[in-house]
Amino acid sequence: MRRQPKQQRSQAVASRIEEATLSLLQEQGFTALNTNAIADRAGVGIKSLYHLYPNKEAIIGRLAMGWLAAVCEAQEQIRIQATSWPQALVLLDEALEALERRFVGYGALWHAMDLIPELHALEQQHERGQIDFWSSLLRDFGCRWPEPELTTLVRYFYRTADVTKQCTRSDGDLGQQMWLLHRHWSEQLIAAAIAEPDPERVWQARPALLLGTEVPAADKWRR
């Protein structure tokens, strides 16, 4: 049998190491994780592991970077396809579902990242990218808010969506209900921000929460 090129063989070994790390994270958590156990689970020598990764933190970092890159790729498709805010949310739901099917078991990875100070900068960089992406998209949809207020709105949307989505992984049906509530609220809130150029009027508004009800136009922003 013809030997695989060295780069291809190295990639195959790296994939096995990353899969083993993810499995052990789910089973044991970050504290109990060690490189010997990873190498044993992956079926590779410890020297081969250290040739590719200096420590377990580096493996977790590589897994995280793969997920975050996939998120950014999915968002570019949202940018291309979405013509309205409601459609963007539908596409976001579809993208998140596809990512969760592709990256099974990544919940344990995020818990591990919280325990690795070196990876906090990666998360912060990703959040800045998220704020830039969603701010740009809302501008495309007509939002005229000043930059500081728009950044605050988008940061609120991103952080609450991130936390709520994590609940769907751990809380089953109840978590899914939380996500739907968050999604409906986000759709209303940001639709208001797109329609109303004055952030203060949106911050002070009390949206009608019952189907078929409306706040009178004369005072809907003053209640």
Image (tube, grey):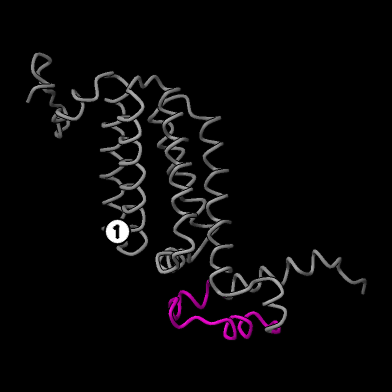
Q: Nearer the viewer, residue 115 or 3?
A: 115
Which residue is at 63% across, 82% downward? 39
Vertical relation: 61 (above or below) 80: below
Callout 1 amino acid: Asp
The answer to whether residue 215 is left or right of residue 96 is left
Q: Which residue is mark 1?
A: 173
Vertical relation: 112 (above or below) 89: below
Residue 22 lies in the magenta-colored region: yes
Query: Where does residue 172 sit, x and y in percent of width and height?
Result: 32, 62
* Image quadrant assignment for residue 54: bottom right
Q: Which residues are magenta?
A: 21-45
Query: Where does residue 57 sit, x and y in percent of width and height?
Result: 53, 70
The answer to whether residue 32 is left or right of residue 219 is right
User: Quick one: SS at disc 1?
Assistant: helix
View extreme (right): residue: 2
Vertical relation: 88 (above or below) 143: below
Image quarter (top left, top right, bottom left or bottom right) of the C terminus: top left
